[in-house]
Image (cartoon, rainbow, N blue to C red):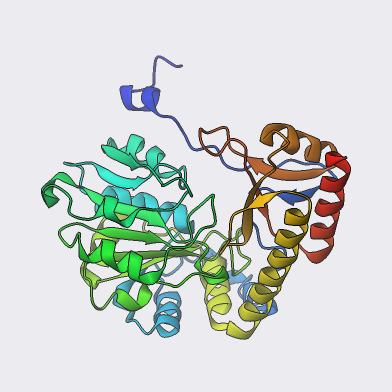
Amino acid sequence: MSRYWNSLVAKLDPYVPGEQPRIQNLIKLNTNEHPYGPSPKVIEAIQAHTNDSLRLYPDPTALELRQAIGKRFQLSPEQVFVGNGSDEVLAHVFHALLKHEAPVLFPDITYSFYPVYCGLYEIKFKAVPLDDDLKIRVEDYLHLEGQRRVGGIIFPNPNAPTGLAHALDTVEKIIAANQDVVVVVDEAYVDFGAQSAVRLIEKYPNLLVVHTLSKSRSLAGLRVGYAMGHADLIQGLDRVKNSFNSYPLDRLALVGATAAIEDQPYFEKTRDAVVRTRGVMTNGLEQLGFQVLPSSANFIFAKHPARDGAELAAALREKNILVRHFKKERIDQYLRITVGTDDECLKLLDACKSILR
């Protein structure tokens, strides 16, 4: 700890990203990256703009990208906000839209960046326990004692790291019951099997839906995320963004992201391939005795009743297969395993067979 740090920095408990090791021949199934590359049109767009134009600043409004997103979801560009990955978008959401005078609610088992944002912006929060099946209890977010005592609500759909999806009517009940505050639905994995809440935006001005291109669009390395909601919410995010960094997306990211959004056939083809492999991986692990939660994401959450989760993760690592293990109460026996290629899936199952012998 440096004597030059201020009191806030000293109190922070930063987010720990998934490991990015430099190991040859590694099967990397720990950070939910897409197993297939981005659309060829993305590469073409980036190559076409890798020229003298890089001396110029990018469009600070990201108009073409916001138009493409708006067209995809039948929204106006004024209802779309973009940022440097959905993590930056979420950071601005916590700063701009979740009220700091009362606790923000989110599940106790969820994306572990949420409490980090609260620490950074000194926001009070309440982690609401999931039920025994690791699902949200909708009643925990309804009939709250005075809306002014709640600073906002955020939860992923599907949830992370469980992969469990909430039905759209469940999501809507939470939004409808809390119209005095912003309800954020983090849909990083929605394309792999859940219902998006985007269709509810016109009905609920307090709803904000956050997406990323890192997962289903194969662009984790480009860092593009976006939020969709009522124009008033987007204006609030813009005010924070323009007080922090007017140019969060460079020229190559803008054109690459636009191409990815516009190439719907490629997105559907590779998304469907991941979903098929997820089924194969799930069935294979269940045959080996694993208990696998029903996943609507590009990963599965599984545990073996006869083997310790940390030991399994370590044994897989010795076989050059990297998965994610969380040292957290209630889920410390589970492994979160990204869906890879068919070949990676088979190698994972073979490794598990060998370890369990």
Q: Toward which corner of the image does residue 276 lie, by quadrant?
A: bottom right
Residue at screen point 41% across, 71% down: 62
* Residue 164, above or below 115: below
Q: Position of residue 348 (x, y in %)?
A: 81, 52
Residue 111 vertical position relative to residue 222 in the rendered view, above or below: above
Front position in the image: 18 or 49? 18
Figure label count: 0
Going by the image, does 92 lie left or right of 55?
left
Of all residues, the one furthest to the top in this rendering is 3
Q: Say which residue appears at 22% left-offset and 66% top-offset.
A: 176
Q: Nearer the viewer, residue 270 or 161?
A: 161
In the image, residue 115 lies at what x, y percent? 38, 39
Say above or below: 5 vs 125: above
Q: Is residue 263 visible?
A: yes
Nearest to the observer: residue 64 or residue 207:
207
- What is the x, y in percent for residue 29? 71, 51
Left/right placement of residue 115 relative to residue 45 reads left
State the image coordinates of residue 11 (x, y, percent, origin top left).
37, 24
Residue 243 visible in the snapshot: no
Dividing the picture into quadrants, the one containing residue 68 is bottom left
Quarter of the picture containing the C terminus is top right
